[in-house]
Image (tube, grey):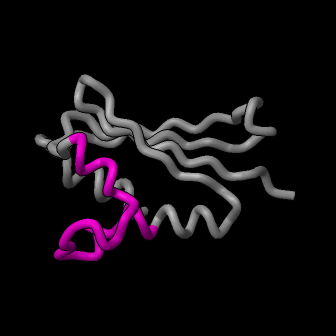
């Protein structure tokens, strides 16, 4: 998944990515996966543009990974969001509806 590679690359010390999965009752039982990168070197204003493939210059396919991942998840009726924590953790939360 591009998000894991992206988080590894933006981490100052290439910290391991923490992955947690859970089922969210308030989202009608959606399955959620939280992907957290620590000590990221992404500026807060860059986070707003992570899902916009035209917002900045991209040198590799990994650079557009977040927007590609978001599109794939949305095509499966899911949602991908990002949150920047004050301790410089970058958290992507993916939610997908349960299989029918």
x, y percentage for residue 98?
Answer: 78, 50
* Stretch in magenta: 44-68
Q: Is residue 28 left or right of residue 90?
A: right
Magenta-colored stretch includes residue 64: yes
x, y percentage for residue 12?
Answer: 12, 42
Quarter of the image for the C terminus: give it.
Answer: bottom right
Query: Which residue is the extreme one toward the left?
Result: 12
Nearer the observer, 92 or 46: 46
Instruction: Write the residue at 53% across / 52% down.
Output: 80
x, y percentage for residue 52?
Answer: 37, 65
Q: Is residue 54 above or below residue 28?
A: below
Instruction: Write the residue at 63% across / 34% down.
Output: 22
Which quadrant of the figure has residue 21? top right
Query: Which residue is the extreme one toward the right?
Result: 100
Quarter of the image for the N terminus: give it.
Answer: bottom left
Nearer the observer, 9 or 92: 92
Q: Is residue 4 above or below residue 90?
A: below
Q: Is residue 49 left or right of residue 72?
A: left
x, y percentage for residue 95?
Answer: 62, 47
Instruction: Write the residue at 33% across / 57% down.
Output: 50
Nearer the observer, 38 or 64: 64
Instruction: Write the residue at 31% across / 73% down.
Output: 54
Magenta-colored stretch includes residue 85: no
């Amino acid at each position: 998944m591009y998000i894991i590679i992206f988080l590894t690359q933006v981490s100052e010390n290439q910290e391991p990515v923490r992955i947690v999965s859970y089922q969210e009752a308030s989202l009608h039982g959606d399955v959620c996966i939280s992907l957290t990168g620590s000590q990221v070197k992404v500026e807060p204003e860059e986070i707003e543009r992570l899902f916009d493939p035209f917002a900045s210059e991209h040198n590799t396919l990994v650079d557009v990974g977040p927007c590609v991942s978001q599109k794939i998840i949305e095509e499966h009726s899911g949602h991908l969001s990002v949150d920047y924590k004050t301790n410089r953790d970058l958290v992507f939360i993916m939610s997908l509806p349960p299989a029918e």
